[in-house]
Image (cartoon, rainbow, N blue to C red):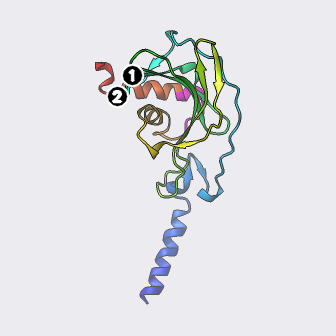
Amino acid sequence: MKKILSVLCLGVCLSANAESPFLQRFGENLEDEQYVFQEESLALPALPDPQSADWVKLPLEAAFQGSAYIFPDSIVAAPDGSIRYIVNARSPSGYDNITAEGLLCVKSTSIVASEPVKWKAYAFGDTAGKRWITARRPQWRVLADKPDPLRTALYEAFCRNGKLNSSDELRKALHTYIRSVPSYNDR
């Protein structure tokens, strides 16, 4: 009798769960096995001047050596669902390390069945030659594999509150995130 009740209870739970938010991915009701990321190739934007006033400083934890900036005009909601942007991780000595990157947000609200957050460097800025040097073997890297304050901040800005569908929404989310970091205005 206990076995029959357990099976019935399981069946009711599973059928109720079919429409649950844990199986919905940013407004789509998909099973995790159905999701396959198909990356799209996008042209790199022009390399921004590292001295431009358009860069926005990112609030990072104190352990981060140097400072980090994002170029807001570079933020793009790509057709493949990734987010593309340009960042500058300036060293404590003032050297600019500009990269064109992508970020893939978690594709499910279910922690157990979710795809991990990933990032990828597409190209590196050659500020002397004012050009991009494409990465030799760019690969998506799992964000949680090692501490990464810069990309963690970008995740908090772009991914924490679900999928944002446009570049304007992403820029607004970035500015909202920056204003929400309590210690940011104290630096």
Give the x, y percent position of residue 113: 52, 57
Residue 173 lies within the magenta run? no
Give the x, y percent position of residue 138: 63, 37
Q: What element carries label 1?
A: loop
Q: Quadrant of residue 168?
A: top right
Give the x, y percent position of residue 159: 49, 38
Tell which of 83 and 93 is nearer to you. Answer: 93
Give me the residue at 52% from left, 46% from top: 106
Whichever of labels 2 and 1 marks the residue nearer the N terminus, that label is: 1
Tell which of 177 and 44 is nearer to you. Answer: 44
Give the x, y percent position of residue 21: 50, 54
User: Which circle, 2 or 1, is nearer the viewer?
Assistant: 1
Give me the residue at 63% from left, 12% from top: 129
Q: Which residue is denoted by mark 1 in the rendering?
A: 66
Give me the residue at 51% from left, 13% from top: 54
Q: Quadrant of residue 92?
A: top left
Amino acid bearing label 1: Gly
Residue 181 is tagged as 2
Q: What element carries label 2?
A: loop
Contact? badges 2 and 1 (CB < 8 Å): no
Residue 165 lies within the magenta run? yes
Q: Which region shows up in magenta?
A: 163-170
